Amino acid sequence: MAALAALGAAGHGGFATDPAGALALAGAAVAAAVAASRLARSGHRAAGRLATGLAASLLVYLGLAVLAVATVAADHRWAGPAVAAWNSAWIPPLALLQLTASAAVRTGAATPRTHRYVVLALGAATLVNALLTTASEPFDGLPTIAGESWRTALAPVGAAVTLLGVAALLLLPVTLWRAALGSHHTVRARLGVAAAATTAAPLTVVFCLLLAIARAPGDVEPSLGSVAFLVALSGAAVFAAACAVTAARDATEARRVGTVVRAAGLAAAALLVVGAGTLVAAPGSSLGPTSVALVVSALTVVVGGGAWAGTGRLAALLTAAPTVPPVTPDGGAEGTETGSAAGTADVAEPADPAGGAASPEVSGTGVSAGAGAASVGGLTAREREVLAALAEGASNAGIAAQLVVSERTVDAHLRAIFVKLDLTPGGDTNRRVRAARIWLEHARQPR
């Protein structure tokens, strides 16, 4: 920070030494470091390490800005490579903020394949961007987001890797939202918070694209847009780190979940309004100032109002109290893909004030009070983990996301559990509900 301030005072660096952007990145690094400490203390060591990596990546971004500005100011022969490295350093924080939030809901020790895909794709995007994209010569200080400030060698390769990176950023949000919406009760809320956090990364990329649109045809000052991007990246990192701590600590109260979901939804709505407004207000537009103001105002009301209502309903869905699952025929909600989202294990109540085990609301479902008589002693350690997640309300996708296994593996474990617990198809309720009740009865027994 001191080096950037000194370089800025000497008239070097332009937006890269702007105090707003530099302070935002430094503040985000501190927030990520605090989150890393809290995650480690809560037992989520993998998420803590990733949050530490997020803090480090933001500090590296600041450090590379110092190096790039200093070498450019000194007209050093390493100025080109330094600027190229700095120009690619914004990509790793996007990957790390997603991985941190995703790891916060994991209980398995293995690394998910989705995490490997994100690391490989965004690692390739970072490397290709650093090698193929260079600043146009000559340039004054550091180039901004303006397209004319950069040139790309082997443009088709760069474009392909960019698309691969964007697709990778959508992988974890899609996976976690699917797992969240198919699960129930606290598991649904926890996965929903993590999903909202991972959504911050693609929204940041969309914001970057909108800044390019704002540059042409919007005719927005590039330096201002570049500072705005640094602030947006920092905000996404802070948001993801906070969500990771929330999900890890199971702090899934309705108000907290509503705040998280609304923040993500309203950010998306704001980007949509800004993008549409920029195009409408472009210098080449045939609309006058009054018409532009009316159009933008209408867009704000419609999009903003829709986002507010939609995110409110989504938050209510994520935090809805458990209900009695419907009775379904065998082969539906009995552990198969088709049953994992509808009639599955929505039986877990919050722990009682005395710290006892959760109690299922299953009146009228045909589960007898003696359902806990079946022993779980014959289950393997992994089968116990699957059954515990099932009893919490996780769908097959939710169990897979938490335990870092495939949904096919979850389905196989569930079938084995049903056999070992002597849960035959049929009866007044499905086997998932009966298996969840057995686990909860087992957890209630004194050790």
Image (cartoon, helix red, strand yellow):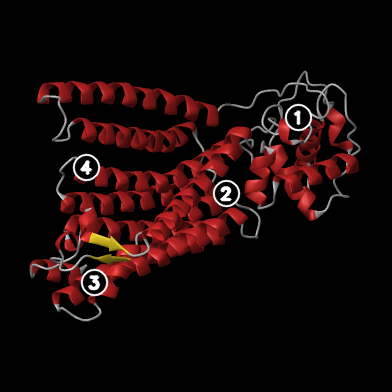
| Element type at mark 3 | helix
Mark closest to the chain's N terminus, 1 or 3: 3
Residue bearing the label numbered 3: 68
Q: Which mark, by number, is residue 411? A: none
In this picture, residue 211 sits left or right of residue 350 = left
Mark closest to the chain's N terminus, 2 or 1: 2
Q: Are marks 2 and 1 in contact (CB under 8 Å)?
A: no
Q: Amino acid at mark 3?
A: Ala
Residue reaching furthest to the bottom: 77
Q: Are marks 1 and 3 in contact (CB under 8 Å)?
A: no
Depicted 339 relative to depicted 243: above or below: above
**Closer to us: mark 4 or mark 3?**
4
Other-residue count near label 2 (Cα within 10 Å), few / some / many at <14 / 14–19 / ≥20: many
Q: Which mark, by number, is residue 333? A: 1
Q: Residue at x 74, y 45 (%)?
A: 408
Give the Cα separation between the discs numbered 2 and 1.
24 Å
Mark closest to the chain's N terminus, 4 or 2: 2
Q: Quadrant of residue 274?
A: top left
Q: Residue at x 19, y 81 (%)?
A: 76
**Closer to us: mark 4 or mark 2?**
4
Res. 384 in view: yes
**Closer to us: mark 2 or mark 1?**
1
Q: Quadrant of residue 262?
A: top left
Depicted 404 relative to depicted 78: above or below: above
Residue bearing the label numbered 2: 105
Q: Amino acid at mark 1?
A: Ala
Q: Are marks 4 and 1 in contact (CB under 8 Å)?
A: no
* Residue 173 percent location from the top left of the image: 51, 44
Q: Residue at x 17, y 51 (%)?
A: 222
Q: Which mark, by number, is residue 214? A: 4
66 or 26, nearer to the observer = 66
